[in-house]
Image (cartoon, rainbow, N blue to C red):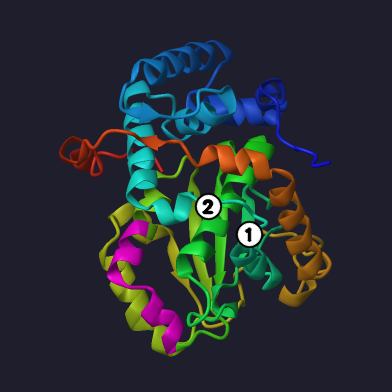
């Protein structure tokens, strides 16, 4: 029997004293503001004929928090992200984790979160994208699993919607085949993903970056707004990259004592598999009517709070 491990709405509201202070100071969140905002966004979604979105508190809260409880900004972000879900269905459909294509990617052990947040409370995820073979594996399936990882973390750990993510992209083993797989469309959609997703990517760190990748990263950044460009960091090694991460949660392979990467990848794989039904149900949420002209204008209006 599958065990569904999802936070309840009650758990989602149970912030520590420190989290409450941070949320009030940095996110404009209080109990009363949160209650009223949740009700208003839920009512707006239910009355929207062209938007199919989840209306539970856990799903709505991350949008409110990243938009600092600005109701109109929250509506724009919800619409923008659900438009992306409609525009790039290969990332958001066929999410049964037991299908062979996704199981093969899990076997590569490419994605994992650290056991605990870093010293600033942020959730830390490592991605090792160069472990896959572009000739035999779809890049879209790779990105799909990455998003599934973000989603499961966001729903299970309340601090993620408060303090955000720190992303490490380990480019060890990067080849020209990997670079070729990232065409302009993929680059642009990835940037949209980072900008529209209902959580803050505080920094995006490319580590073990080979010199020949510099031109590609520079091209990548030309599609970004200035705020996102400031979050991008690249280094040839890992030296100085983990200053905010306690050594006891950093994996052995990265110079810490937090155990092997295999234990972390196995844990997150199991958690995703246990939540198979939720991921399959989640496929239906998207913009249901084409409003491209109107929504495209709003792509440039996304909150600059972060």
Q: In this view, does 38 lie above or below 246?
A: above
* Residue 62: in magenta span: no
Q: Mark 1 points at which residue?
A: 99
Q: Residue at left 56%, top 37%?
A: 281
Left or right of 190 on screen, residue 150:
right
Mark 1: secondary structure: loop
Main SS of the magenta part reads: helix
- Mark 2 surroundings: few (<14), some (14-19) or many (≥20) residues within 10 A: some
Disc sitting over residue 249 in the figure: none
In the rendered image, residue 179 lying in the magenta stretch gets the answer yes
**Where is residue 130 drawn, in percent x and y?**
55, 79
Q: Position of residue 173 (x, y in %)?
A: 56, 86
Taking the image as shown, residue 130 lies to the left or right of residue 117, namely left
Quadrant of the frame with the C terminus: top left
Rounded to the nearest angstrom, the CA distance separating label 2 from label 1 is: 8 Å
Mark 2 near mark 1, Cβ–Cβ under 8 Å? yes
Across and down, in percent, residue 142 comes to: 53, 65
Residue 82 appears anywhere in the view: yes
Q: Please give the residue where the numbered disc 2 appears in the rendered image.
A: 94
Magenta segment boundaries in residue numbering: 176-189
- What residue sits 29% from the left and 65% below the top? 185
Q: Which of marks 2 and 1 is nearer the N terminus?
A: 2
Numbered disc 2: secondary structure:
loop
Write down the quadrant of residue 298 in the picture. top left
At x 41%, y 32%, the residue is: 67
- Quadrant assignment for the N terminus: top right
């Amino acid at each position: 029997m599958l065990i569904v491990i999802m936070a309840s709405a009650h758990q989602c509201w149970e912030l520590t004293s420190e989290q409450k202070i941070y949320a009030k100071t940095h996110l404009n969140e209080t109990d009363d503001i949160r209650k009223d905002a949740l009700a208003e966004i839920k009512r707006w979604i239910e009355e929207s004929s062209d938007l199919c979105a989840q209306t539970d508190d856990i799903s709505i809260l991350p949008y409110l928090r990243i938009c600092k409880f600005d109701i109109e900004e929250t509506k724009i972000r919800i619409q923008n992200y659900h438009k992306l879900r409609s525009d790039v269905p290969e990332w958001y459909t066929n999410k049964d984790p037991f299908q062979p294509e996704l199981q093969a990617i899990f076997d590569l052990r490419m994605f994992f979160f650290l056991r605990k947040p870093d010293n600033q409370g942020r959730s830390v995820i490592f991605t090792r994208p160069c472990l896959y073979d572009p000739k035999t594996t779809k890049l879209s399936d790779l990105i799909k699993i990455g998003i599934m990882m973000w989603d499961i973390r966001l729903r299970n750990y309340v601090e993620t919607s408060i303090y955000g993510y720190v992303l490490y992209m380990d480019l060890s083993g990067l080849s020209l085949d990997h670079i070729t797989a990232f065409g302009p469309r993929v680059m642009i959609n990835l940037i949209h993903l980072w900008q529209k997703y209902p959580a803050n990517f505080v920094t995006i760190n490319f580590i073990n970056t080979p010199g020949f990748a510099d031109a590609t990263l520079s091209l990548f950044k030309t599609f970004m707004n200035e705020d996102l460009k400031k979050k991008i960091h690249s280094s040839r090694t890992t030296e100085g990259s983990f200053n905010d991460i306690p050594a006891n949660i950093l994996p052995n392979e990265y110079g810490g004592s937090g155990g092997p990467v295999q234990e972390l990848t196995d844990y997150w794989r199991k958690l995703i598999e246990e939540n198979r039904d939720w991921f399959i149900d989640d496929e239906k949420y998207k913009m249901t009517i084409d409003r491209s002209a109107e929504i495209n204008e709003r792509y440039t209006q996304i909150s600059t709070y972060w």
